[in-house]
Amino acid sequence: MLNIVISLIFVFLLYSLFATIIMEVLSAVFALRANNLKKALRNMLDNGDQNYFDAFLEQDSLYKQLAGRFTGKKTPPSYLNPKNFSLMMLNVLERSSNGLPLVEDQIESLPNGSMKDVLKMYYKDAESNIDVFKFNMESWFDNVMDRASGWYKRKIRVILILVGFLIATVFNVDTLEIFGRLQDQALANQLSELAGDLVASEATVEAIGLEALQAEFGKINLNELSIGWSEYTSGVKSFSSTNILMSFLGWIITALAISLGAPFWFDLLNKLVKFRGTGNTKDIIVVQNDNRRSDQQHAVKVIEG
């Protein structure tokens, strides 16, 4: 049974890695991280009727440079460190106050709004020390980015479920059918050995790229796992409502499994393969001890005889 579980997790891992590659492409094309950062900054710099991100921070020279605007890139930066944020915020305050020299006066010149309230609070806490005020703004940025990271993960999880379902339907990766095929002990043993080889290679999940993934898929006979549409096209299976309904349920399970992410399945696979190895080692020791007892008993009988 353990080999069946390991084999199924191995399949989930491979398709999760495939989904990860697709997600990386989508993230780059649609600038998902960059737009998430932009949304977080717009929320931070919202101040009543005016948003100081649109009016000032987005126009800051450092922000444009980090975004790659000077090289023709149109998307926002995908990452911003706290120190750069605090420096840009000082520029925002100076420009929005028409060059007032004191930070306290710059903050007071802002119209009433949530951003002004936050800045006043942090400046008061800094006791007018500009270095402490910058540190407070950096902490503000870090706290908001932690929440933004949560938004991003939830958004990615939803997209990953959709990508997983697309993979499951396009390639007919039906978890229920795969589990049924893995009842063949020889097939389960073969796949679990491939999983063991992957773990033994000591590769990290981040190091498994497209080329390595293709190599792993090349070791598997997908038809034996009923992955793909060949059984339908060859007439082995019919496109009956019952078959499609059961396949749909299997695709849903596959999509949910893929949404857990490749790191989850990779870690679980490592633990189970190591557990199996430990179990095998114990079995070997037991067998060796039994053999030794048999030899000893045989020797005693010879002596007594």
Image (cartoon, helix red, strand yellow):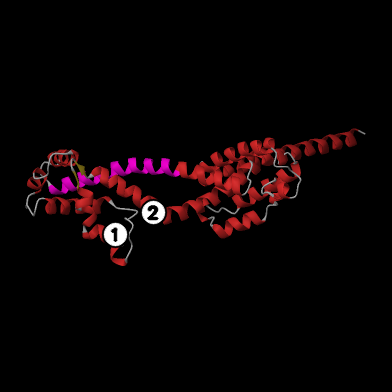
Instruction: Answer with the quarter of the image where residue 244 lies.
Output: top right
Horizontal and vertical percent position of residue 267: 54, 43
Q: Earlier in the sequence, mark 1 or mark 2?
A: 2
Q: Does residue 279 show up?
A: no
Label 2 sits on what residue type? Ala
Q: How dense is the environment of label 1, judged by Cα within 10 Å: few (below 14), some, or many (20 and up)?
A: some
Numbered mark located on residue 66 in the image: 1
Label 1 sits on what residue type? Leu
Residue in the picture at 62% in, 46% down: 11
Outermost residue to the bottom: 71
Reply yes or no: does residue 141 show up in magenta.
Answer: yes
Q: Does residue 49 show up?
A: yes
In the rendered picture of this protein, how many numbered marks are placed on residues? 2
Figure quadrant of the C terminus: top right
Horizontal and vertical percent position of residue 174: 64, 42
Does 211 sit left or right of 101 as displayed? right
Disc 1 to disc 2, how far (Cα)? 14 Å
Does 121 sit left or right of 32 as displayed? left
Secondary structure at badge 2 equals loop
Outermost residue to the right: 305
Horizontal and vertical percent position of residue 120: 14, 40
Residue in the picture at 43% in, 53% down: 27
Does 284 sit left or right of 257 as displayed? right
Reply yes or no: does residue 138 show up in magenta.
Answer: yes
* Residue that badge 2 annotates: 31
Residue segment shown in magenta = 130-156
Pick the front one: 89 or 300: 89
Secondary structure at badge 1 equals helix
Horizontal and vertical percent position of residue 92: 17, 52
